[in-house]
Each structure stands twice: as structure tokens, then as C-alpha cells.
Image: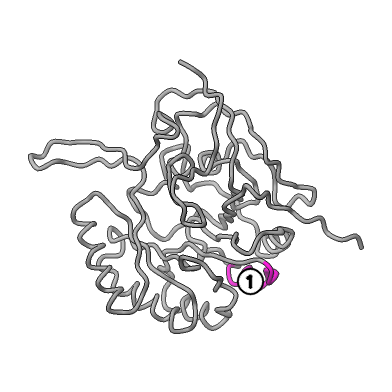
């Protein structure tokens, strides 16, 4: 039997994301995965655990470039534990989760997964748990669950969202002190996208949060433009399709490959796009990269159509 062809990750790639499922057990009003009629979590087919393992084990990555399991909520994939336990040891693993999985799910994961599988050396936790006070109230139960993971040896921390709503912001402050008291690492991520609210005299307002200065007018525009775009991320949808950006992933459009295709290889090239103006904020926002360095964007864009 011939040796299976590997998938080489270009040096320019900074992120590998496997969206195991788009299903989620929460329904946050600000979710960037559920953004209207076209960009939403509906209608995604899912690979089985065996299909994921066979495909992902072809990847030859770097020690500092893990496969990040995300979604949706990755714990909702029926074969999540199987996938983690059967990835080859050379692949490091990160998990993005809300850990809202119930006591039985919690106990099963802790009992069946070796913490060493998800415990790489990094500046941030391998399991990053998002706290959403809009859905989780004071988060007391979340802290208890994270503490159980930590006591079992998992590298885990909680991430709040710098939400512009004063009530949710106050909940984050409370969560921060709760984490300090429990010996849990707590950090905050910037709010991304549009926030609509009311000022002190009850007048409605809308503010776009995030720094998009590298690619002005790239998000939330009515009209779109042509451009050339190159990604620095391997984005794998629930059924194995590869996408050049989060916008295409959530819209289920313009797939550039299939991770289950044994001949698939990454092409580190610019591709034509006609959706500049409707970019997903995750792709064009200035942020930190996997080394926690500032001023990184997930995509590089050039030749933007002039108006």
C-alpha cells in the first residue's frame, strides 16, 4: 500500500480551524456565526469522526500551530472524543468551547481524554472557554466546570467578551474576580461587529467595534467590490469543505477544496473575490496572531476595485 499523501502547511499560515459542527447550545444575539438569512448556522452536513481523523491525520503542521476545534460548539459533535483520542500525537490540539455540556458530558470527557493530548506550551490556554453572561447568568456553574477540568490536568482558561452593554460588562468584572478566587486564568476578547443600543436619553445608536483600518469599508457595506484575496488560515467546514475566509464558510459558498480528498493540497495564492464590503469581521479586523503579536489580519487583500 502506498504511503498516504500528506498536507503541508505553508509557513505563512497562522491558524488551522476545524469547524466540527455549526450547532450550538446557546443563542447569543451578537454571534458572528449566525448573521442573517445567508450567513447562518443552518444546513451544514457533518463528517463522521472516522472521516475527520483520516483527513486531519494527513496534516503536517508545526509545534506552535495546533488544530483548533471550534464551531458552533465542538462538544456537540457526536464523535468529538473519538476524534481527539485518535489524532496522531504529532498534532497539537486547541479547543474553543462554551463548556455548556452538562455534568454527564463533562465527566465523560474528563474520564476518557488524557489531558496530555490538549496541553501544549503556549502563551494562552489550549482550551479557551467563552463566557456569555447574556446566556450564562453569573457564570458560577461555568467556573465550577472549568475548575474540574483544571484539577484533572487540562490546560484551560475563561475568556470574556468586552461587550459594550453596561450590564454585560459588569458581569464580566464579576466573572474576573470569581476566576481569581478560583485560581482560573481569565482574559477578555474585544467585541467585534456592530452594536446597537440606546444612550442615556433613550436615543437609538449603532457603533461598529473593531479596528478595520487596514481594509476600510470591508464590512457591513450594502455594495460589494471585486478584489484579490489570500488567506493565512486553513478553514475546514463541517463536511470537510475548505474555504478562503469566514464569510464564505458561513455562507457555504466558494469552497476551494475538500479535506477528505486524498489529492487535496494547500495553494498559498491570491484568489479572485467579489464580496469586498461583506467581509466577515474575523477576517479583516486587526488582532493578535498565534504568537500574540498585534496588527495581524487573517487575510491579505489587494487590487480592490475602485469606485
On screen, residue 237 above or below 108: above
71 or 183, which lies in front? 183
The residue under the point 64% across, 45% down is: 242
On screen, residue 168 above or below 231: below
Q: Residue furthest front?
A: 293
The residue under the point 54% across, 70% down is: 121
Give residue 55's quadrant in the image.
Answer: bottom right
Please state if 58 lies on the left or on the right of 301 as rendered. right
298 or 264, which lies in front? 298
The residue under the point 70% across, 51% down is: 259
Give residue 200's quadrant in the image.
Answer: top left
293 or 102, which lies in front? 293
- Looking at the rendered image, the quarter that the N terminus falls into is bottom right
> What secondary structure do most residues of the magenta stretch adopt?
helix
Please state if 172 lies on the left or on the right of 36 as rendered. left
Q: Is residue 86 magenta?
A: yes
Q: How far across and how far down the image is residue 256, in percent?
A: 67, 39
Q: Is residue 154 magenta?
A: no
What crowding class fits label 1: few (fewer than 14 Cα within 10 Å), some (14-19), or many (20 or more)? some
On screen, residue 100 above or below 169: below
In the image, which residues are magenta? 80-90
Please state if 58 lies on the left or on the right of 187 as rendered. right
Q: How far across and how far down the image is residue 4, in percent?
A: 83, 59
The residue under the point 48% across, 62% down is: 96
Q: Secondary structure at mark 1?
A: helix
The residue indicated by pointer 1 is: 82
Q: How far across and how far down the image is residue 135, in percent?
A: 31, 60
Q: Residue furthest right?
A: 1
Amino acid at each position: 500500500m502506498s504511503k498516504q499523501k500528506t498536507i503541508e502547511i505553508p509557513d505563512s499560515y497562522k491558524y488551522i480551524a476545524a469547524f466540527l459542527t455549526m450547532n450550538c447550545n446557546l443563542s447569543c444575539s451578537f454571534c458572528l456565526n449566525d448573521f442573517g438569512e445567508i450567513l447562518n448556522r443552518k444546513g451544514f452536513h457533518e463528517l463522521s469522526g472516522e472521516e475527520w481523523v483520516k483527513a486531519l491525520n494527513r496534516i503536517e503542521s508545526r509545534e506552535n500551530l495546533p488544530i483548533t476545534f471550534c464551531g458552533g460548539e465542538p462538544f456537540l459533535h457526536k464523535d468529538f472524543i473519538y476524534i481527539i483520542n485518535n489524532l496522531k500525537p504529532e498534532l497539537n490540539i486547541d479547543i474553543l468551547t462554551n463548556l455548556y455540556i452538562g455534568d454527564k458530558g463533562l465527566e465523560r470527557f474528563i474520564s476518557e481524554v488524557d489531558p496530555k493530548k490538549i496541553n501544549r506550551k503556549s502563551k494562552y490556554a489550549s482550551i479557551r472557554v467563552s463566557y456569555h453572561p447574556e446566556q450564562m447568568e453569573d457564570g458560577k456553574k461555568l467556573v465550577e466546570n472549568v475548575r474540574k477540568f483544571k484539577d484533572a490536568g487540562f490546560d484551560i482558561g475563561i475568556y470574556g467578551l468586552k461587550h459594550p452593554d453596561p450590564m454585560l460588562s459588569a458581569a464580566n468584572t464579576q466573572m474576573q474576580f470569581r476566576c481569581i478566587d478560583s485560581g482560573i486564568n481569565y482574559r477578555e476578547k474585544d467585541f467585534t461587529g456592530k452594536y446597537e443600543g440606546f444612550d442615556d436619553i433613550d436615543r437609538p445608536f449603532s457603533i461598529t467595534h473593531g479596528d478595520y483600518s487596514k481594509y476600510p469599508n470591508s464590512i457591513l457595506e450594502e455594495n460589494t467590490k471585486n478584489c484579490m484575496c489570500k488567506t493565512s488560515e486553513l478553514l475546514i467546514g463541517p463536511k470537510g469543505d475548505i474555504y478562503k475566509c469566514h464569510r464564505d464558510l458561513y455562507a457555504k459558498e466558494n469552497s476551494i477544496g475538500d479535506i477528505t480528498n486524498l489529492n487535496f493540497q494547500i495553494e498559498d495564492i491570491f484568489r479572485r473575490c467579489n464580496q469586498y464590503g461583506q467581509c466577515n469581521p474575523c477576517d479583516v479586523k486587526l488582532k493578535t496572531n498565534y504568537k500574540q503579536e498585534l496588527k495581524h489580519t487573517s487575510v491579505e487583500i489587494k487590487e480592490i476595485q475602485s469606485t
